[in-house]
Image (cartoon, grey):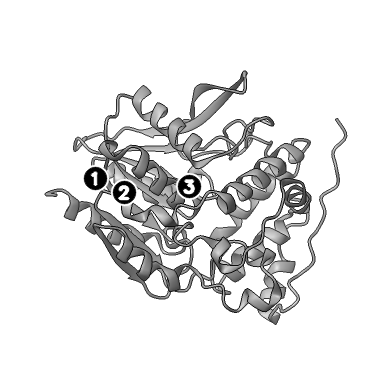
Amino acid sequence: MTRRPTRTAPLPRACLPLVCLLVAAAPATPPSYGARLERFAYPYPVKTMPLTVVGEPAEMAYMDVVPERPNGRTVVLLHGKNFCGATWEATARPLADAGYRVVIPDQLGFCKSSKPRAMQYSFEALASNTDKLLKSLGIAHATVIGHSMGGMLAMRYAIMYPAAVDRLVLVNPLGLRDRSEDGLPYTDVDALWAGERRTSAASIKAYQLENYYHGQWKSAYDRWVAMQAGMYAGPGRDQVALAQAKTSEMIKTQPVAHELYRIKAPTTLIIGTLDKTAFGRAQVPTSLRGFLQAIPQIAPEAARKIPRAKLIKLDGLGHSPQVEDAARFNRTLMGVLSGAAGS
């Protein structure tokens, strides 16, 4: 198959000099890791669970980290849309060291899992697959931790399977508001797909720098840019782009915000206060963009709607606190989990 040339996205129009410099430094031709990250190393052995999607075989990849000295508890880590199970590496290690069994799936359509062309993505389907995975591993209940889109999935999972969730932890989650109510229009999959085909290492880095890391870039983040860009760099890029387009439509059309009252598990929202993520900002009319609140602004109201929720703010951190300052995030998380021990 002929390899398609990688397009380089234009720099942001309102780009600050430092931002422009950092974006320009992004690799023009990232490594080709394969549509399922076949050539990208994960921190733990990767296993797969077979599934069937519209009559076709598929595989859900996951890591199952078994501690040397088990404490009898399990934690499930759910990745975001622009992330993978590997991104939880700095969180999984201390959890396992503390005795937790740690299960880290890659959802269908993402990372090392299959990306079935015929699949109609839904949070219900992803939650159902996650439940099948945990049951196949003999896990009846767990603490579920979801980041970004994974937080939206974690909320849906907790609503669908309340008896399976000991505690819910949401890290800068999407889904706390129905963005349609904020003026976000519908964009069809073909238009989203066309946009995804333009993805490059430079465009990924520009987006993350502005929205996730508040203009402060660390060289450690380059690995995660290369991971994401590496799925788009080879012959399978259209397959990856289509899955990403479909999951963007899923986030827009399947809000969970109206059902927050249905979450029964004790819930903690861990919010990096400098997060500028507001899903769909690029699709909102220019006149409304200034009114589209980011996750830290909407989290307090959402926390009040969840019956047993509390909010922890991580001042000075952005959308991915577990990546930006793993030590601080892990201290916070361990405090939440130790507090859950007697509940």
* CB-based contact (under 8 Å), mark 2 and mark 1: yes
Q: Distance between the residues labelled 3 and 2?
A: 17 Å
In the rendered structure, the answer to whether residue 123 lies left or right of residue 110 reads left
* Mark seen at residue 94: 2
- For disc 3, the marked residue is 79
Q: Who is closer to the viewer here, 105 or 262?
A: 262
Residue at x-position 35% and y-position 45% = 93
Residue at x-position 55% and y-position 62% = 179
> Does dot 2 land on a helix, a strand or a loop?
helix
Residue 232: image x %, image y %? 72, 45
Residue 285: image x %, image y %? 70, 71
- For disc 1, the marked residue is 98
Relative vertical location of residue 193 with respect to residue 221 in this rendering, above or below? above
Quarter of the image containing the N terminus? Answer: top right
Q: Count how many numbered circles sit on residues in the image.
A: 3
- The three-letter code of the residue at mark 3 reads His
- The three-letter code of the residue at mark 1 reads Ala
